[in-house]
């Protein structure tokens, strides 16, 4: 493998060079943990779980020990007053934040928590399979208790615990800002959705469900990932129950999908995860294997995946060069279906119970439900056993439907089993970031012409120039402002959705 360490050795500072050596040791443990997590989600046998969890606990403990050691603390202090490039200053910022995050947690608690979340995903998966929330509830209670304890360790004077958790995923978006954001979505999109559902417009989509052979779906998945720009010399595509993307660095990026009788489910999950993957592949080599050699935030990451999936992938112009390929793969299913019918079908608005299968308009309302529940869990000490009922009530209020069982309600997402409280809002923020980028991009170039000609690369190059190459060097709000000329503005997202789906359904 090519040695990339030389790429980030530019700062001529003895203290920084020594710090980098320690950080590389820490990142080696992180790399091992990522590989174990990948294996856990793709190929590991069921009974491996408890044993792998102990290994993960040991590795996590070693990582914490390095990152909170006296030497890293001393070197961080030594580097503080030095003149360093932007990338080095960003590495110092991330290292300092990681030190502060980890040093307040007793090592025995940190290791116990890592073992808990490693095993909890299997407990959740079994509970979902058995449609039994009660079987997962005690584990969820422990995870929430740990998360609240860890947040309390880190909270600054007067800072709310949920704000601490939110800051881990998207800096600059606390409850005050998110309440305004989600309040605007609730005010604008809930009544708009009701008008669409009452419009009387019927869009046929029955042809998306049926006997779609898995081997043909695999062929399509590889084609689409490569078509939008995923580099299989630096990445792989595997199968998992819950599609995801992970990476060791920008020369080893891994995406997954799943296959079912709903061809659009796999198809768009591949495009979505490819968006994540292309972001990681686009990080500049000078940042490889450093603390900033990855995406800026969860929200910015989601902006790239949803930009690719929805703004690009559900655009009719995207299918002009390649729809015939789809028909050739599935002649009996799609041979008589026109491109226009297909595109209308994959944009059909139909409130459903499953977030990952949600249409573009309904998607952020699914996130709204989770945001409001997380606030109650953390800030109001909601009893976890009340979650299924409250979940169903919120779905009825915002989407007009109620789940009939836990597996399609409160147990559908893996995130809480992984301890990812505060993660969900980044999905809605990412969609809004993407819409703002798209509005700006349309002023710079003819996006639809690029899609019709099959030149997805021209679009990816713009994203790489303004977003991807910076990795985590700059925070998401700065990246958005540097690219579009203004701070985050959710009005672009609401306008995008209303214009697109208003035209499709003939409503205002």
Image (cartoon, rainbow, N blue to C red):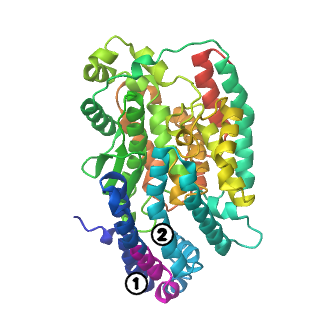
Q: Secondary structure at mark 1?
A: helix
Residue to which mark 2 is pinned: 114
Quick check: 23 left or right of 225?
right
Classed neighbour count for the residue bearing mark 2: other residues with Cα under 10 Å, few (<14), some (14–19), many (≥20): many
- From this view, report whether residue 5 is shown above or below residue 185: below
The quarter of the image holding the N terminus is bottom left
Q: Quadrant of residue 99?
A: bottom right
383 part of magenta stretch = no
- From this view, report whether residue 1 is shown above or below residue 68: above
Of residues 130 and 494, the one nearer the viewer is 130
Residue ID at (61%, 30%): 496
Q: Quadrant of residue 323?
A: top left
What segment is highlighted magenta in the picture?
Answer: 58-74
Q: Which numbered circle lies on residue 18?
A: 1
The x, y position of residue 233, in whole percent, is 24, 50
Magenta segment, prevailing SS (helix, strand or loop): helix
């Amino acid at each position: 493998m090519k040695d990339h360490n030389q790429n980030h050795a530019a700062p001529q500072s003895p203290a920084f060079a020594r710090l980098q050596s320690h950080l590389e040791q820490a990142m080696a443990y992180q790399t091992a943990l990522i590989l174990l997590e990948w294996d856990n989600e793709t190929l590991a046998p069921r009974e491996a779980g408890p044993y792998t969890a102990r290994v993960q606990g040991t590795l996590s403990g070693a990582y914490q020990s390095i990152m909170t050691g006296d030497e890293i603390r001393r070197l961080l202090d030594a580097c503080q007053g030095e003149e360093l490039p932007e990338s080095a200053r960003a590495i110092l910022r991330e290292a300092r934040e990681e030190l502060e995050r980890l040093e307040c947690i007793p090592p025995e608690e940190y290791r116990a928590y890592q073992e808990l979340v490693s095993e909890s995903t299997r407990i959740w998966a079994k509970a979902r399979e058995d449609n039994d929330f009660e079987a997962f509830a005690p584990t969820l209670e422990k995870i929430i208790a740990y998360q609240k304890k860890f947040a309390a360790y880190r909270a600054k004077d007067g800072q709310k615990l949920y704000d601490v958790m939110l800051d881990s995923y998207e800096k600059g978006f606390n409850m005050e800002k998110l309440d305004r954001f989600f309040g605007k979505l609730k005010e604008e999109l809930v009544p708009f959705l009701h008008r669409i559902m009452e419009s009387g417009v019927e869009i046929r989509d029955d042809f998306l469900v049926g006997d779609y052979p898995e081997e043909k779906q695999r062929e399509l998945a590889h084609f689409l990932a490569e078509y939008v720009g995923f580099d299989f010399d630096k990445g792989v595509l595997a199968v998992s129950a819950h599609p995801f993307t992970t990476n060791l660095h920008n020369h080893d990026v891994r995406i997954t999908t799943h296959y079912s009788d709903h061809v659009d489910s796999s198809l768009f999950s591949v495009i979505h995860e490819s968006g994540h993957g292309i972001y990681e592949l686009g990080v500049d080599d000078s940042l490889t294997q450093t603390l900033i050699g990855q995406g800026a935030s969860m929200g910015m990451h989601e902006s790239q995946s949803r930009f690719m999936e929805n703004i690009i992938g559900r655009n009719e112009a995207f299918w002009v060069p390649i729809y015939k390929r789809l028909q050739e793969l599935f002649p009996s299913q799609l041979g008589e279906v026109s491109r226009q019918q297909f595109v209308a079908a994959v944009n059909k608005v139909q409130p459903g119970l499953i977030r990952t299968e949600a249409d573009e308009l309904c998607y952020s309302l699914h996130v709204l439900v989770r945001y409001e529940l997380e606030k109650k869990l953390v800030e109001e000490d909601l009893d976890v056993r009340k979650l299924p009922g409250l979940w169903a009530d919120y779905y009825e209020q915002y989407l007009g439907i109620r789940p009939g069982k836990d597996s399609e309600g409160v147990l559908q997402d893996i995130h809480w089993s992984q301890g990812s409280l505060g993660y969900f809002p980044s999905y809605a923020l990412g969609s809004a970031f993407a819409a703002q980028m798209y509005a700006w991009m349309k002023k710079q170039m003819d996006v639809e012409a690029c899609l019709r000609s099959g030149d997805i690369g021209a679009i990816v190059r713009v994203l790489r120039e303004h977003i991807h190459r910076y990795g985590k060097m700059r925070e998401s709000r700065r990246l958005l402002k540097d690219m579009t000329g203004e701070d985050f503005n959710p009005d672009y997202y609401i306008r995008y959705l209303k214009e697109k789906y208003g035209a499709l359904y003939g409503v205002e």
